[in-house]
Image: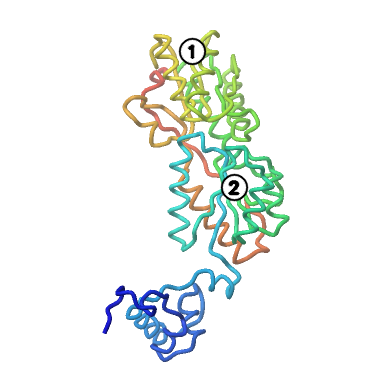
Amino acid sequence: MKERGEGSATSERRTTAKEVAEAAGVSISAVSRTFTKGASVSPATREKVLAATRVLGYQPNMLARALMTKRTELIGLISNNFDNPAFMEIFDLFTRRLQQRGRRPLLANLSGGMESATALDMLLQYNVDGVIVASSMLPPQFAEACAEARLPVVQAFGRPGAAPDVHVVGADNIQGGRLAGQILSERGYHKVAFLGGPATATSTEDRLRGLRQSLKRAGLSPVAVVYGASYSHEAGSEQMRKLLDEEIDAVFCGDDILAMGAIDACREASLRVPEDIGIIGFNDLAMAAWPAYRLTTIRQPIRDIIVTAVDLVLNIVDEPTRPREARLFACEPAIRATLREATRR
């Protein structure tokens, strides 16, 4: 008898569901139900099927199952933040959560100039079950177009109300901006500048709005506001060099990567952080705690946002008429070493 792998036609082809059904003494539909989440199958039948599967080395055909269930188990993940190293951390969390829930991501990278319409066509061609838009920079029309195409869609890191027909999960960026202003005021900073990401990003707008509200309570306002073209180290460094021409004593950077670029620009100018200038970021990425930066920042609960976004889009797939939801998570401070100590009252 030939062993598996010796080259026979039988050993080279895939085991079929029909062969598993015959070996287990059950119907083909029972085999299909065993590998379909939520399908009804008795424990005894399930055990027979799994035992036959182990013996025959059967692997379910995902394409065939998709034809039967009308679901591909694919979730589209859309972003245009790939020039920000932080997105790799976010993408890792998204993919892991999707895999934990038995789904696979289909990635569309809009950073390189791919048109939104092209991305939507790709999602429809692959018949994804749902879409997560992981960006605050994409125009709301894209998420609305997904909804019009009857694709369940959730925007992560977005602003509620930007696209009325789209579910949103994100951080309370206005509250986070207020928190940054409060921390700066408590430490006696009076000449505060804002260094944001792209001016069109809703997160940038909201973090600046919160900063203005907080500083106003202290009788202050931002002395300068600049925007980077992207959430990159280069953009942070470039904009910080412009701010150094102003009379400032602290900078609220709307992103940790921008803040790291700002810190390095200060070092190039022989300025010490925090002795000569204070810097506070936003996000609390893993890199913010690196010894080279030890960045004081505003922590948004990235993991909670991602888990909630994934779970929500899967719930919408199961319940398409689910009422629109907007979930905002509060931010909190992560105090390290780039601001001076709080002023004693």
At 52% from the left and 53% from the top, the residue drawn is 308
Q: For the point 54% across and 38% down, which residue is it? A: 81
Q: How many marks?
A: 2
How far across and how far down the image is residue 12, in percent? 38, 74
Q: In the drawing, what numbered circle is on residue 284? A: none
> In this view of the protein, which residue sits in the foreground, 120 or 93?
120
Q: Position of residue 13 (x, y in %)?
A: 41, 75
In terms of sequence position, does the residue under pointer 2 or pointer 1 come before the other?
Answer: 2
Instruction: Return the x and y of residue 50 as percentages of the image width and height.
Output: 37, 80
Tell which of 289 and 53 is nearer to you.
53
Quarter of the view holding residue 140 = top right
Pick the quarter of the image with the C terminus: top left
**Does residue 269 lie above or below 129 as drawn?**
above
Q: For this view, does 57 lie left or right of residue 178? A: left
Instruction: Look at label 1 and name its amino acid.
Output: Asp
- Vertical placement of residue 49 versus 271, above or below: below
Circle on res. 133 = 2
Q: Assess disc 2: are there few (<14), some (14-19) or many (≥20) residues with their C-alpha within 10 Å of its C-alpha.
A: many
Q: Amino acid at mark 2?
A: Val
Crowd tier of the residue under label 1, counting other residues whose Cα lies within 10 Å: few below 14, some 14–19, many 20 or above = some
Instruction: Tell me what residue is drawn at x 62 percent, y 34 percent.
Output: 201
Residue 4 appears left or right of 98: left
In the rendered image, the vertical position of residue 340 relative to residue 281, given as above or below:
above
Numbered tag placed on residue 249 in the rendering: 1
Whole-angstrom CA distance, mark 2 to mark 1, is 37 Å
Q: Is disc 1 placed on a helix, strand or loop?
A: loop
Quadrant of residue 116 within the rendered picture: top right
Quadrant the N terminus occupies? bottom left
